[in-house]
Image (spheres, coloured by chain):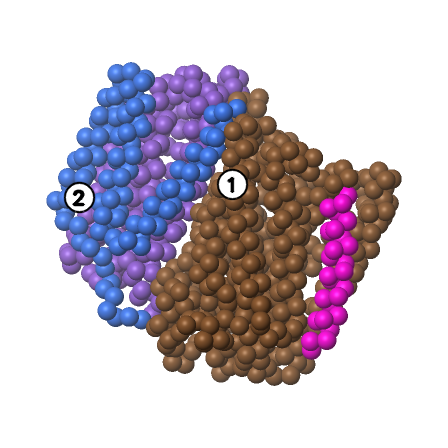
Amino acid sequence: MSYLDRQGQGGLSSWIFSTDHKRVSLLYLTLMTVFFWVAVGIGIAMRLKHLSGSDFLISARTYNALFTVHGVIMVFLFVIPGLPAVFGNFFLPVLIGAKDVSFPRLNLLSWWLFLTGACLALLSLFTGPGAPDTGWTFYVPFSLRTGTNVSLAVFAAFVLGFSSILTGINFITTVHRMRCEGMTWHRMPLFVWAIYSTGWIQVLATPIIGITLLLVILERAFGIGVFDPARGGDPVLYQHLFWIYSHPAVYIMIVPAMGAITEIIPTFARRCIFGYKAIAYSSLAIAGLGSLVWAHHMFTSGMADLANIIFSLLTFLVAVPSAIKVFNWTATLYKGSTDMQPAMLYALTFVFLFAIGGLTGVMQGALGLNVHLHDTYWIVGHFHYVMFGGTGFAFFAALLYWFPKMFGRQYDPKPAYAAWVLMFLGFNMLYGSFMVLGYMGMPRRYFAHLPQFHSLHLAATIGSWALVSGLAVLFGNFLIALKRGAPAESNPWGGKTLEWTLPSPPAAENFHTPPVVTEAPYSYNPKARA
Amino acid sequence: MNDMEHGQGHIVEAAILLKVWGALLALTGLLVGASLVSPTLAVAAMLTLTPIKAWLVLYYFMHIKYEGPLLRGMVLIALSVLVIFIGMMFLDLAFR
Amino acid sequence: MSEAVHSDYQGAKIGMWLFLFTELMLFGGLFLLYSAYRMLHPEEFHHASQELNAVIGVANTLVLLTSSLFIAMALTAVQQGRHEAGGRWAALCAGLGGLFLVNKGFEWAAKFHHGIYPGSSLVKAMPPGEGLFFGLYFTMTGLHALHVLIGVILLAVVALLVKRGRVRQGDCVLLENSGLYWHLVDVIWIFLLPLFYLAA
């Protein structure tokens, strides 16, 4: 009996109160897809506004609310939970041969907190004095002064952070305690390493944003003065605390994405991963080094020169472990017999777009150039290359890769290719234009733009239409496959990790008999391993 | 699950716990005493005696002395990360 | 299935420690702010902390240190199979936690009575840095008191479970984890005492 089959009374309650990690994963997927589309819609609305240089469709106030809400939803409700909550939940236990995560009930609680946070975030838009207009960073002093509904939005982010923490605790413990017989650390699939590293960032960094956001609420409610210059407070300290979490959060978003890519590339290149240990430990290195670069978001905030220089240097260094991964993926492809299935195409697109996002990130880490680029569309373009071109495409690649396993249905590859063409062109048109705009001097978050920027804004808006059409094709294709897809084989891609030994979809208890692992993952070319 | 795993940890003798408690009270006394003498001494005492007190609780009451390398390592990582965060923030604040 | 999972003693303890790390970092953010602002406003912090009642701070320290001893004794007793004593130690610990909260209540009430509370006109009129000190004082001791409150409830429940034999020798990870939580609350107070009450 598969985990999707009717259980007990059936119906909604057999899902929303299920402690089965696979069902929890689908709960996340459902909720996140809804919010993803809401935020996509908001993004499209912002692009429509820029069809004209000044007042058009949307007022300046609404525009401020739109980019705030777009950011908050995409960051806290899609990219941060993204791969860990959906694919981590589903495949972490399976990949290490376990029945479930260490704390199944805690896992369900995480989802409920996620739901609560999501509802509070929505509530903050439609209640009180209006949707927050601070940008997703909630920078003081504006977030303390604005009359909009900041406190509730911030509290929503706090609850979502708590959900993320509990997921992290669960995953770390699971990796330590639930590995099946023979599953040594160096036999774990690299997605597990990535999720494990991410868990540490979630546990150690998220509480910092928790307390920071609580302080914003207290400051707004009681005026305790901690970030208020008039009372001796220092707004730059808010930025420190905010980025101590929010920069590592970038790695919460990207490291699991890299992990998923590392699963996909060997499968479709029919090659054992090149540099297993280098990839595994570079995940940990990213988690460690990535926690020490936060102040590169603050080079123009008036920090000490010494701090600027050190954080700039560390920023250059954190590119090294990311580059290690890119080189190893490339080396894995070398002499591989590549099967360009949609999942592989999206995974390679990830590598390409992430490389652009990553390298532009290194550029911004240079102190001189940063002054020119800070708070421009360049930055917006850069982080969309990382977050959407990176995490977004990895999310789609992972979904294309694991969809047959998760749902027991196979999708039609042709629309997925067509969607790729639209998305790839649209994406680069949209965010490529952003980078050029920013380099020319277009500041981010501005409601209006000068005439000389108009043609590029127009190109970006047209790109956004292509991008969203591609997304619609991709998701529509999945929906059709859910309804009418042919039954999936247990191992449609010829994968070598444990999930492909299970039927599609897997049974409720995953493994009927606990598996015993005797060799490293990705054993495609046994000679090369010796 | 593995039944070989025992269901409880190391037993710390009550006598040890009492000694630690005595030490904690004594250190608190010293701390208060130092704060009455001079501000400089108060700061010095705060920076030395307080971590010792925390260490005693961590080591004996929280059984870190008796745990394996895994938990000890984890605690070390978490504490180091906090210290590094605070330290690196001062790279900015102290040199402005 | 979840029964089997929950009998993983080591796993339960790893999970608890990870949770404690998040608590540590939560307070860590506040300690970071405290240290930054003490560096920026040394005089004002010194002056403002004279308003605090060191006697009640020290008294509460003794209460918490002793309560920590009690919960450690409770664990030792239950591990040795002396369940009745274990339940009693745990209940006494919860009682001391309650006493801490009562003291804290009196302390805060006195401050409020003197017009010192977050956002009061008196605090707002203080020179920059001094009002900040009280902002941090109320935030940090308040957040700590909230943790004490949660701990008291938790320990009361655990004491009851020990009494009913649900937590017993060989199966007492709930007691051990609650104890770990309580000790962490104690450790945080160990730092709060000199930072606020003895800073004058």
Amino acid under label 2? Leu
Residue at 55% over, 42% down: A315
Q: CA distance from mark 2 to mark 1?
A: 44 Å
Chain of the residue that carries numbered disc 1 in the rendered image? A
Which residue is under mark 1? A314
Work out whether A59 lies above or below C164: above
Q: Is residue A491 visible?
A: yes
Disc 2 versus disc 1: nearer the observer? 1
Q: Is residue A114 left or right of residue C74?
A: right
Mark 2 residue element: helix
Which lettered chain is shown in purple?
C
Work out whether C168 lies above or below A231: below
Which residue is under mark 2? B17
The one of C157 and B91 positioned closer to us in this rendering:
B91
Which lettered chain is shown in blue?
B
Count of numbered circles on the image: 2
Q: Quadrant of residue A298?
A: top right
Residue at 17% over, 44% down: B17
Q: From the top left corner, tell me how far across and down residue B44 is, in percent.
A: 30, 23
Mark 1 residue element: helix
Majority SS type along the magenta span: helix
Looking at the image, the residue that sits furthest to the left is B15
* Bounds of the magenta segment: A412-437
Does residue A422 belong to the magenta stretch?
A: yes
Residue at 63% over, 41% down: A364
Does residue C163 belong to the magenta stretch?
A: no
Dots 2 and 1 on the same chain: no
Q: Is residue C153 visible?
A: no
